[in-house]
Every structure is written in structure tokens, then in C-alpha cells.
Image: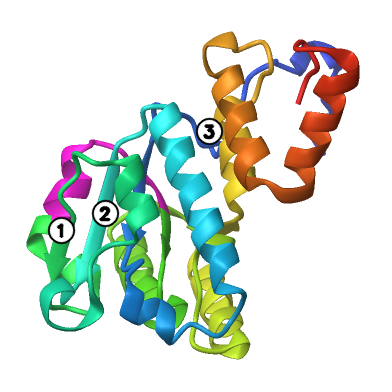
Amino acid sequence: MTVFSPDDVVAAPSPDLLTPDNAVFLFVDHQPQMFFGTGSGDRAAIVNNTTGLAKAAKLFGVPTVITTVAAESFSGPALPQLVAVFPDHKPVDRTSMNAWEDTALVDAVRATGRKKIVISGLWTEVCLVLPVLSALSQGYEVYVVADASGGVTPAAHEHALERMSRAGAVTVTWVQVLLELQRDWARQETYDGVMEIVKEHAGAYGLGVVYAKHFLGADAAG
């Protein structure tokens, strides 16, 4: 058995952690028709969480790809709140249910040079699970944002998350991603931005920040 002394401990982050420099965000099919069929959770909450996740990507300058399926013929445009965060992004529209079978989409992800994909989408059991399994098979590390995604039923959502986890994907939440990117409250260049996202989108946590700042002042930590 290997025995470690205190001198062997190095203050260094795990390579598994997401950072602004190693991740790419992929938003898959957050569209009206897909939301109509989503029944695994509150749809307004999924919209809120997706928007918060998008603002996290924008704040930290993480490369972001938005993709839609059959936007002009069936599913409708990308979520307006998502488009508002990235007004200069043109979504990659596809015909394939599996986004990873669309060359333009894969090229867009590969062009970032990142190997950690933070992905969310509708529906979990189809348009999310298919590209996740495909990306994993090609050596990508995939982080599935469960609360910015939704399936047709609670069972469909949960079974899809389980299938992806068994294949090697990591399930996370949008606030977890936001705070993992920040990771140190001394990073002042993004501190205020994180606090604004939290206050607007993180529910009770956001109210707690408002409360703390009211009594403790502007320097209250997250």
C-alpha cells in the first residue's frame, strides 16, 4: 500500500474540472416544438436554467455552439432567451436527430480544439443521448447539464441520464458548472458577473446573495 506524507500533497486542481480554457458548450434543440413535448420537469425552469447556463458560457468566454433540428419546417427557432445571450451566433440547423451525424456541427465543435463538451438539450432520450454517446466514442469528455435538459417523461429523462452516465458521461447542474468555472471568489474579473447570474437565475441561492449583500455590503462572498 502506498503511503503519502503531507509533503506529497500538491495544491493543484483536478484535470477533470471544467475551466474557461478547456471546455466547449453545446446547446441542442432548445426549440418550441421540443418544449411542447417535454414533460420531465417544469418547462419554465428548464428555460431559466438554460439561460443561466448560456450566460455562464458568455461571461467566461467559453466557445459555444447552438444547434437546432428542422427549425424552418417543424421545430421552430432556437429559444429566444438563448439567442439573446448569443445574438451573433447562427445556429447549426440539421435534419438528423443525432447532432453528431451532422458534419457542420461536428466541425464547429472540433474547431474549438476543446475536448470537454458541456451539453444540454431536448429531448434527453433522443437528441441529447445520441450525440453524447457518439462524442464519447470519439474520445471527448462529456458533461451533461441535467437541469437544462428535458425528456418526454420523468422516466425517459432519468433513464437517458443513466444510460449516458454508464457510458462515461458526467451529469452536472447549471449552477455547478457556473461555480466550477469561477472556482475562486478572488477572481474579481468575473465575480460581479457570476453574482448577477446567480441573482437572476439561481432561485433561493440568488435571494440569499441579495440578502447577504443587503446586510454585509458589496463585498459579501458568494
Q: Quadrant of residue 128?
A: bottom left
Q: Secondary structure under badge 1?
A: strand
Q: Which residue is mark 3?
A: 15
Q: Position of residue 145 (x, y in %)?
A: 52, 58
- CA distance separating discs 2 and 1: 6 Å
Identity of the residue furthest to the right in this view: 215
Q: Which residue is mark 2?
A: 66
- Looking at marks 1 and 3 on the same chain, the residue that comes earlier in the sequence is marked by 3
The disc label shown at residue 170, or none: none
Contact? badges 3 and 2 (CB < 8 Å): no
154 sits left or right of 98 in the view? right
Identity of the residue furthest to the front in this view: 214
Would you call the spot at circle 3 few (<14 residues within 10 Å), some (14-19), or many (20 or more)? few
Indicate which label's residue lies in the foreground, 1 or 3.
1
167 sits left or right of 99 in the view? right
27 sits left or right of 75 in the view? right
Q: Which residue is mark 1?
A: 92
Q: Secondary structure under badge 2?
A: strand
When the figure is inspected, residue 49 is found, relative to residue 12, above or below; the finding is below
Quarter of the image with the C terminus is top right
The type of residue carrying mark 1 is Val
Q: Looking at the image, can residue 61 be seen?
A: yes
Q: Looking at the image, can residue 146 be seen?
A: no
